[in-house]
Amino acid sequence: MDWYLKVLKQYADFNGRARRKEYWMFFLFNIIISWVLQGIAITSGFSLIGYIASIYSLAVLLPGIGVSIRRLHDVNKSGWFMFIALIPLVGMIWLIVVLATEGDKGPNQYGPDPKNPTDELNEIGIA
């Protein structure tokens, strides 16, 4: 749950890098919450819950895009790489593979390694 809240706190942050765990935990909690809200809306027939589910989906859209871009940065890809998903069938599969790939070790052009943010050796260099 901490990973989910971390993404929500970084609401519209498109800079830096996100670990695989951060991305996939946000994805998992987001799916569970959406399914629960939709299930309640369908079984109860109470339309207000359907509206709440729609508002929730809109509310987590921007954090979801943000964590996806930061995840792509972790594998040293631009955020624009998300548009590869627009290629029918192959694009979405390739994007999922990239999102599931382990990130670059050490700093890259998008920032320090999120798995070891206190790695001063990479910042200072070896003398």
Image: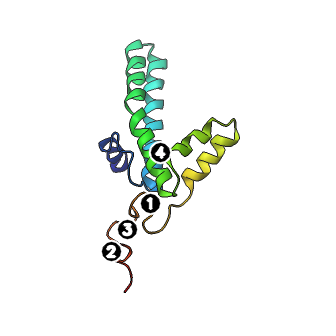
The quarter holding residue 125 reads: bottom left
For disc 3, the marked residue is 116
- Which label is found at residue 68? 4
Q: Residue at x 41, y 27 (%)?
A: 58
Please, what is the three-letter code of the amino acid marked with disc 2? Answer: Glu
Residue at x 70%, y 38% (from the top left corner): 89
* First along the sequence among labels 2 and 1: 1
Which structural element holds mark 4?
helix
Q: Which residue is mark 2?
A: 120
In screen coordinates, is 103 left or right of 93?
left
Residue type beneath disc 4: Ser
Residues at marks 3 and 2, CA–CA distance in whole angstroms: 9 Å
Residue type at tag 1: Gln
Cβ atoms under marks 4 and 2 closer than 8 Å:
no
- Give the crowd class for mark 1: few <14, some 14-19, many >=20 residues within 10 Å: few
Given this view, does label 4 or label 1 mark the residue nearer the observer?
A: 1
Residue at position x 62%, y 35% in the image: 86
Q: Provide residue 79's location: percent of width, then percent of height.
A: 49, 46
